[in-house]
Image: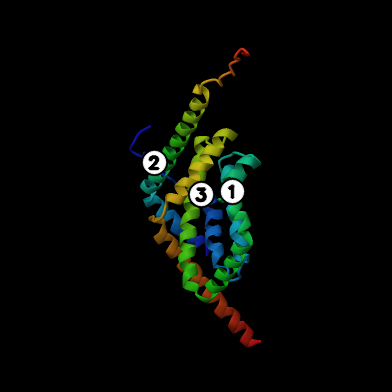
Amino acid sequence: MMARTRSQMATAWRDLSGYFAQIGAQYEQQLEQLHIARLQESLVVTDAPPPTLPTHTPDS
Amino acid sequence: MNDEPTIRDDKFEWAIYVDATLAGLAILIPIPLVDVLFEWIFKRRMPQAIARRNGRTLSPDTVRQLNRSNFSCLGCLLWPLELVWLLLKRTYRTILYFLTVKEATDKLSYYWHRAYLLNKMLERGDLDHQENAALAAQALHQVLESVTTSPLTQLAQEVIGNVRHILRSSWRWLRRKQKMK
């Protein structure tokens, strides 16, 4: 059973290289977007203004 | 990065797809929950087996990220209900076998995609560092969720047709043997 499946798949895989390239490209694109999102998040954290210190008003 | 996907000769390697195929076919085991167990086992074997094929070893954390399912607190609370639902569905499915064939086709196609992408991730070195591996795993899950129809579905139908034929033949052979006794 597995031998037949294996040979069926081997034949089909030869014709599917274009399709797999598309799936691969989709993955690369998705990963790139996630990397950019992470980078933007880290920039937002870095660029955030420092917390303002409480101002001491002289006692009246 | 080029916009056009580069078409390269993806040589078929059985070692990469064997666990994916068995995970997809596990659903054809006509015993409720045993099929789930076997699917789970083969699914979990995929990352490490494909890594070995690439001469690599994955850290347990990376394997966990790759094998994780969508998990939430609500999902955790609903788990007993989900189990009951799963048991009912699987029992019903045993009666209506054609539903199984559809589900098996989808699963087989899904696991073939997963095996291809895991191999690609390892080839690219996306799983080499823990920090990048988490993002790569997330990208993997997103791509797999977005794939609905594919040319692999037809092939999956043919493979499942063969398996069903073999299961039917085995069943007839067993019955003949019992009658002879």
Badge number at residue B115: 3
Amino acid type of the residue tagged 3 in the rendering: Ala
Of the two numbered discs 1 and 3 on the same chain, state the one appearing first in sequence. Answer: 1
Which label lies toward us, 2 or 1?
1
> Visible in this render: residue B65?
yes
Check disc 1: other Cα within 10 Å, few if <14, some if 14-19, many if 20+: few
Q: Secondary structure at mark 2?
A: loop
- Which image quarter holds the C terminus of chain B? bottom right
Q: Which secondary structure, mark 3? A: helix
* Percent coordinates x, y for residue B84 in the rendering: 61, 67
> Real-space Cα distance between discs 2 and 1?
30 Å
* Residue at which label 1 appears: B68
Q: Which residue is mark 2?
A: B8
Q: Amino acid at mark 2?
A: Arg
Q: Residues within 10 Å of mark 3 (few under 14, many from 20)?
A: many
Estimate the x, y position of residue B112 in percent, counting from the top left: 48, 53
